[in-house]
Each structure stands twice: as structure tokens, then as C-alpha cells.
Amino acid sequence: MNADVPPGEYELWRGSPEEYKVLTWAEVRGIPGTLVGLGIAYVIWSIPWFPISPWLVLAFVVSLLIQMPIRPLVRWYRVATTSYLLTDKRILTTTRPFGFRRTRDSPLRLLKAPELRDETEDGFGTITFDGSGTPSFMLVGNRFVPTLRGIPDVRAVLAKIKDRLED
């Protein structure tokens, strides 16, 4: 028995995200938006009577330019420090941002309808749960509905979760 498994429970599956997308569609769409923002900042800079300070617009655009390469790095770090543990009673999601361990507990009895999303040809995918379970989580003080992202052999993990939900 592993030390991470709560007493009285047994481990069904343990894993971590192994697939990672460098850029999301939001970031890809943000690149032209930032370039348009730079153009607007240049136009505003050249009009002396414009009511908004060009320094304010420039500061906003520069913050976007700084944020664009940092967001994928932060996402990569979050994925690299995330692990999942499926027991017979719950799903534990553990992250270690900046050296601090944070574990989120999701009892299986509160989860609704697991769904397979974004499955790739090599068996990686994401398991999400129906959002209708969220009010149940709020009643017990837990607003976290887990999403198992980028896991290998996703169909086998989904089958284990469905078996436990049927019990």
C-alpha cells in the first residue's frame, strides 16, 4: 500500500498527464490580437490629442507581449507537477506548484457521467465529468470537479471509473 492512498482504500490507477499542448487556440488567436494592439498603440502614439495616454496603451500591449511566452511555460510546469490517484472511493489530484503540495479530493459518489474527450490515435485523452455534479460538491464544501487531462491508455482508466461509479 502506498503512503498516498488514504487508509481503508485501495489504489485502482495512478498516473500523470503525459501529453501537453504547447499553444492553445486562445493563444494562437491572441498573437494577431496583440499585433493589432501594437498597431493601435502606434496610431494612438502618433495622435497627440487622443484622450487615452499612449503610455497606458503601450503598457497594456507590453504586458500582453510579456504574458504570451510565459503562459505556456506556466501551463507546462503545472502539467509536469500534476499527478492523479484513483482509489475505490475517490479521485485525488495532486499538484506541486512552487514546491507546495496541494491535493484535491473528489469523492466518486458525487461524480456524474464521466466523458472521454480529445482522444488521440495513440490512446491519450482527457476524462471530464458532467458539470451537473457541481452543486453536490458545493454542499460538502468542495467545488472542485476533476478533469484528468492528457493521460495514457485513457479508455482503460475510463472503464475503471465507470465500474466504480456503478457499484
Image (spheres, rainbow, N blue to C red):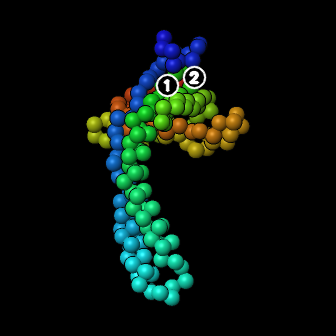
Q: Look at 45% across and 81% down and name the residue there.
A: 44
Residue type at the position of mark 2? Lys
Report, in whole angstroms, how far the alpha carbon at label 2 lies from the one at label 1. Answer: 8 Å
- Among the 4 quarters of the image, the one containing residue 126: top left
Residue at 47% x, 67% y: name it.
Answer: 59
Which quadrant of the structure image shows residue 140? top right
Quarter-of-image position of residue 58: bottom left
Determine the residue positioned at 51% across, 88% down.
Answer: 49
In the image shown, does 66 or 146 lie closer to the viewer? 66
Residue 143 makes an appearance in the image: yes
Determine which residue is flagged by label 2.
89
Indicate the position of residue 130 as horizontal and vertical percent values.
55, 42
Which residue lies most toward the top here? 1
Which quarter of the rendered picture does the C terminus lie within?
A: top right
Callout 2: SS: loop
Q: Is residue 44 above or below residue 148?
A: below
148 is higher (above) or lower (below) than 156? below
Residue 132 coordinates in the image, percent (x, y): 61, 44
Label 1: how many Cα within 10 Å (few below 14, some 14–19, many 20+): many
Tell me which amino acid carries mark 1: Leu
- Residue at the limit of the structure toward the right, as seen here: 139
Q: Return the x and y of residue 105 as percentages of the image width and height.
A: 58, 30
* Residue underneath mark 1: 86
| Circle number at residue 66 | none
